[in-house]
């Protein structure tokens, strides 16, 4: 469900150090043991997706489910718990037993950490144990084909000429929210100079809004470029092989790109309750070991790239 309001910008920018520190803390730490870990799992496993169906988190969880089933010998169910920009799903996980039969597909950095830093959550990042930093969701600036803008520079000019008129859509407190706030700040434009429409259900809702022409420009994942848009900038150090003619953010900003830390994308990770790792270390080791083995299979890597 969209909301049309500007969110606090400065606290988001200040939370950058915490976000980066949390990213650095995400690392696989299994012992490599594949012992059956006292009969675990003894019942079906639930992967909680704190977003709606059809988005990157949902597709990743559903791709992993049968792979975990084959290794763990239990049915793996994927349950969508969208709402409050992923906070409801994370709160739901913390309400479940810490026996390892509930896992969450999270976006810890920056989305979860940012919201915790802003005081929007009733829990802390230390309440979760992250298995790894599975993937980074790289960003790109897209503009609907029927809009007259061709570049970020032209968008900035249009915002200056028509303050409060241009619309952009996104997920609040996400990497793209922080990125947009940073770029507007570099252009010496207040965040309120655009109409910022947010979707709490996740990236799938944002892409639907882009496809339906409900925005003048937006940042989205470069791996899921919607139809009927122009890609105007990639938020990467080098040009993307699928869009070799599109400039990078460094080429667009020049020296300004080093003025502030940029968030090129969101980190996805499976996580459990932190108490599961503390109270059941053998089960934790087996879960991480199986997860590592799955992700290291060449055919799995190819399948995720194909997504």
Image: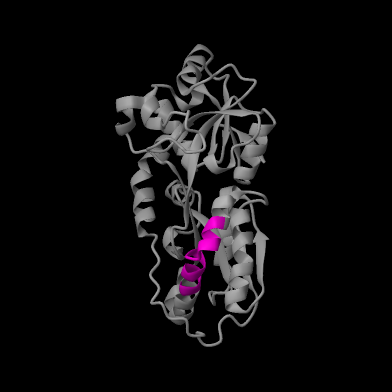
Q: Furthest residue to the bottom?
A: 38
Q: Check residue 146 for magenta coloring.
A: no
> Which sits in the foreground, 104 or 238?
238
Question: Hey, which quadrant is residue 237 in on the image?
Answer: top left
Q: Give the image location of residue 272, x and y in percent.
A: 51, 67
Q: Give the image location of residue 11, x and y in percent.
A: 40, 40
Q: Residue at x 54, y 74 (%)?
A: 100
Q: Does any portion of residue 253 appear in the rendered image?
A: yes
Q: Give the image location of residue 302, x and y in percent.
A: 54, 56
Q: Locate residue 164 relative to residue 66 in the image: left or right.
A: left
Question: Hey, which quadrant is residue 277 in on the image?
Answer: bottom left
Question: Hey, which quadrant is residue 5 in on the image?
Answer: top right
Residue 182 drawn above or below residue 175: above
Q: Furthest residue to the top?
A: 161
Residue 228 drawn above or below residue 96: above
Magenta range is 289-302
> Which sits in the foreground, 38 or 276?
38
Q: Residue at x 49, y 17 (%)?
A: 154
């Amino acid at each position: 469900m969209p909301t049309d309001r500007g969110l606090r910008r400065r606290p988001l920018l200040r939370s950058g150090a915490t976000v980066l520190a949390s990213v650095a803390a995400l690392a696989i730490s299994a012992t490599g043991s594949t012992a059956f870990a006292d009969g675990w799992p003894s019942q079906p496993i639930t992967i909680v997706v704190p977003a709606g169906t059809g988005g990157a988190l949902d597709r990743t969880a559903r791709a992993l489910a049968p792979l975990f089933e084959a290794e763990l010998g239990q049915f793996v169910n994927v349950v969508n718990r969208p709402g409050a920009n992923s906070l409801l799903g994370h709160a739901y996980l913390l309400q479940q037993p810490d026996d390892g039969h509930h896992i969450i597909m999270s976006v810890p950095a920056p989305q979860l950490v940012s919201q915790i830093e802003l005081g929007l959550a009733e829990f802390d990042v230390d309440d979760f144990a992250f298995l790894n930093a599975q993937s980074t969701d790289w960003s790109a600036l897209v503009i609907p084909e029927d809009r007259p803008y061709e570049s970020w520079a032209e968008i900035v000019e249009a915002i200056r000429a028509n303050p409060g008129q241009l619309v952009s859509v996104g997920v609040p407190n996400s990497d793209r929210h922080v990125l947009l706030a940073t770029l507007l700040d570099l252009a010496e434009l207040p965040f309120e100079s655009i109409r910022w429409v947010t979707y709490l259900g996740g990236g799938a809702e944002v892409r639907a809004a882009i496809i339906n022409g409900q925005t003048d420009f937006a940042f989205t994942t470069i791996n899921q470029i919607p139809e009927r848009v122009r890609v105007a900038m990639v938020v990467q150090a080098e040009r993307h092989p699928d869009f070799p003619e599109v400039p990078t953010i460094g080429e667009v900003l020049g020296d300004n790109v080093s003025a502030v830390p940029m968030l090129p994308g969101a980190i996805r990770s499976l996580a459990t309750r932190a108490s599961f790792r503390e109270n059941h270390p053998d089960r934790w080791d087996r879960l991480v070991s199986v997860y590592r083995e799955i992700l290291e299979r060449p055919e799995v890597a190819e399948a995720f790239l194909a997504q």
